[in-house]
Each structure stands twice: as structure tokens, then as C-alpha cells.
Image (cartoon, grey):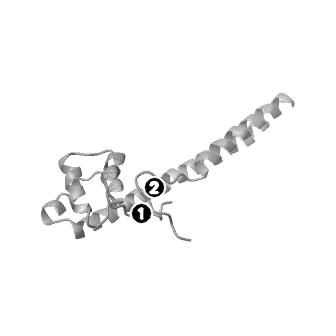
Amino acid sequence: MENPAQNADNHVMIPTQTFLVPFFMIVLTLFYFVFQLFSDFSREGLIPVILTLGVAMATIGSRRQAIGVQDRLIRLEERLRMQQLLHDDMASRIHEFTTSQLIALRFASDEELPGLARKVLTENISDRKAIKQLIQNWRADHQRI
């Protein structure tokens, strides 16, 4: 199956669990409290709620860790790419890019990256969305987690 073309307006990927985990947490919590209203309350009845909250926190935590690792890999990949594509005067400034800037610049084509990188540093553009809007030749990223 061919991946659709990406641009600044349609590149965001929102994982399903972003919505499903909170939804099921709310449903389970409501179900539990309704169940408790119609039965005898006991401390043992809190065990499923505590376990459910633990699973939800573990799920959210694992997602945050995956995104953090992905951001670190993007930062490394983009720094290596910049070492190859930028002229010496800009290559010596690669360490000045923030992680957020590098994440946004990954969508720039190889031809466009040197000029865009210079503009981002000289104008101190730090907003990811603003950087992405400057990109003319979009380099798609279909490998997002």
C-alpha cells in the first residue's frame, strides 16, 4: 500500500491508545462506582480500581518513553544528516539546534535543509509549527511510532 503524500497540514499521527486508554479508564471507573452503589462496599473492592489505574499509568508511561526515545533518535539522525549537508560554517553550529528544531527540520528535503537551517538559527525560530510551515519540499516520515 502506498503511503499518502505528507505536508505540514497532514503529517501528525495520533495513536489510537491516546483516546482508548482514557475512555476505558472512565468507563471502568464509572462501572466500578455504579457497581459499588448497588453492593456492599469493601476494601477488597478497591483492588480492581487500583490495578486498573496502575495499568493505565503504565500504558501512558510506556507511550511517553517511546516518544522520548524516538525524539532522541531523530535528534541523532538529523545531526548526522546536517554534518553531511551543511557547509563548514553551519556544520560547526549544529550543536546550537534544539531538539524541537531538529524534530521540525527532519521534514525538510536535502536541498532545502542548508538554507532553512541557517534561517532557523539566525532568526532563532523555535516553534515547530512555524519551522514546518517554512518547508517547501516536504520529506515524508512514514516511520513514526
Residue 18 in the image: state x and y as whole percent: 58, 48
Name the residue located 45 percent from the left edge and 63 percent from the top edge: 5
Q: Secondary structure at mark 2?
A: loop
Outermost residue to the left: 89
Q: Pointer 2: what residue?
A: 11
Residue 111 in the image: state x and y as whole percent: 26, 66
Horizontally, residue 141 falls left or right of residue 1, namely left
Outermost residue to the top: 37
Q: Residues within 10 Å of mark 1 (few under 14, many from 20)?
A: some
Name the residue located 22 percent from the left edge and 53 percent from the top edge: 96
Q: Nearer the viewer, residue 66 or 91?
A: 91
User: For residue 126, what is the image quadrant?
Assistant: top left
Horizontally, residue 88 falls left or right of residue 23, namely left
Residue 28 in the image: state x and y as whole percent: 73, 40
Q: Nearer the viewer, residue 111 or 53?
A: 111
Res. 100 visible in picture: no
- As measured in the structure, the alpha-carbon distance from the residue carrying label 2 to the one carrying label 1 is 8 Å
User: What is the quadrant of the N terminus in the image?
Assistant: bottom right
Horizontally, residue 98 falls left or right of residue 43, namely left
Q: Pointer 1: what residue?
A: 140
Amino acid type at mark 1: Ala
Q: Secondary structure at mark 1?
A: loop
